[in-house]
Amino acid sequence: LKPVRVHCPARLLYVWTPGLREMAFFPVVLLTLAVVHPGAAAPALRGNASSHSGVQRGARVPDAGLQKARIGRSLTFVNSCPEPLAVTGSEAAYTRLAPGASHVMDIGQMGSTNWRFTPYFLPGDSNLCPEDACSGWRVTNPARGSEWVGGMNPHYAAVCNPDLSGRAGVVGCCSKESPDYNAATGNCPNINNGGWGSLFEVFFDAWGGLDFLDFSTNFVNPDQGYVFFNIPMSLTSPASCSNGGSLRWQCLAADCNTAYQSPEDSEHNGAQLSCPSSASYMVEYCPGGKMP
């Protein structure tokens, strides 16, 4: 059997098989898979913009072999930006990283196999927010990739919540003067809310002894949502992955072709990576000190 991706908006079930780019509508297929493989799960879900922050992750039947294989594996986040970052993710994960700092997560202790992570700049010694509080960045609905590149757009996109930007009197960037600034966390939860920004997705022990990983920007087709990019990022692993060797994967701008540029990957750019389920990974933000 080939891995499948399953996406269920409302009551309609889509089943997509890698290697077959066509979409098919077979509700019975999921039932068959559930009977044949009661403990299996599909690789990383792809869907519209809302799916990135609102997908319900199904529980899996515990597998002692998989749990043992996870021992000693780690996912490390590194902040190479000159400014502090917050990394938010699934299961309400929240990590604050000072410049040059790193944070290691034990994959064996992570409670879900399907994770999504997004970084945000936090208020530091310098104020990265534009003087107009993001009112000068008017993002259309649906968004267009061109609104994330060229001129001042990358700077706006780096720090401005696109849902709050372009409005007079509305603060779209997190600073110590922002109305919802939380001094305890150093963050603004209503601005840096997980619904925008550079998206890294990983599905551990997804299928056939493999992890599935990807960056997702939706630059070509935001699908009624936003372009998911604010901070450059890279992914590395010493394991031999589907790119033909040890992994070094970068997405340095919103239009990078190493990311999903549309939810259905119509560009066929090989954005989804597969690595053995014994691998460890490092995600670096501002790789080499590169700021947006």
Image (cartoon, helix red, strand yellow):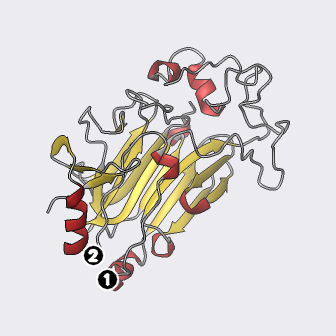
Work out whether residue 185 or residue 180 is closer to the camera in this orientation and state it: 180
Q: For residue 136, what is the image quadrant?
A: top right
Quarter of the rendering occupied by the N terminus: bottom left
At a point 50% along the width and 37% down the height, the residue shown is 232
Figure check: 155 above or below 277: above
At a point 25% along the width and 41% down the height, the residue shown is 270
**Residue 71: x and y, percent?**
42, 78
**Is 236 left, or right, of 89 in this rendering?**
left
Q: Is residue 144 visible?
A: yes
Question: For the residue marked with disc 1, what is the amino acid?
Answer: Gly
Separation of disc 2 and disc 1 at Cα?
A: 15 Å
**Is 287 left, or right, of 5 in this rendering?**
right
Figure check: 66 above or below 43: below
Instruction: Point out which mark residue 38 bears.
Output: 2
**Is 100 left, or right, of 277 in this rendering?**
right
Instruction: Point out which mark residue 135 bears.
Output: none
**Residue 163: x and y, percent?**
63, 31
Figure check: 252 above or below 43: above
Secondary structure under the numbered disc 2 in the rendered image = loop
**Residue 165: x and y, percent?**
67, 25
Secondary structure under the numbered disc 1 in the rendered image = helix
Nearer-N-terminus badge (2/1): 2
Q: For residue 218, what is the image quadrant?
A: top left
Work out whether residue 65 or residue 226 is closer to the camera in this orientation and state it: 226
Quarter of the rendering occupied by the C terminus: top right
Q: Which residue is mark 1?
A: 65
Work out whether residue 75 or residue 177 is closer to the camera in this orientation and state it: 177
**Crowd band around label 2 with a 10 angstrom C-alpha radius: few (<14), some (14–19), many (20+):** few
**Crowd band around label 1 with a 10 angstrom C-alpha radius: few (<14), some (14–19), many (20+):** few
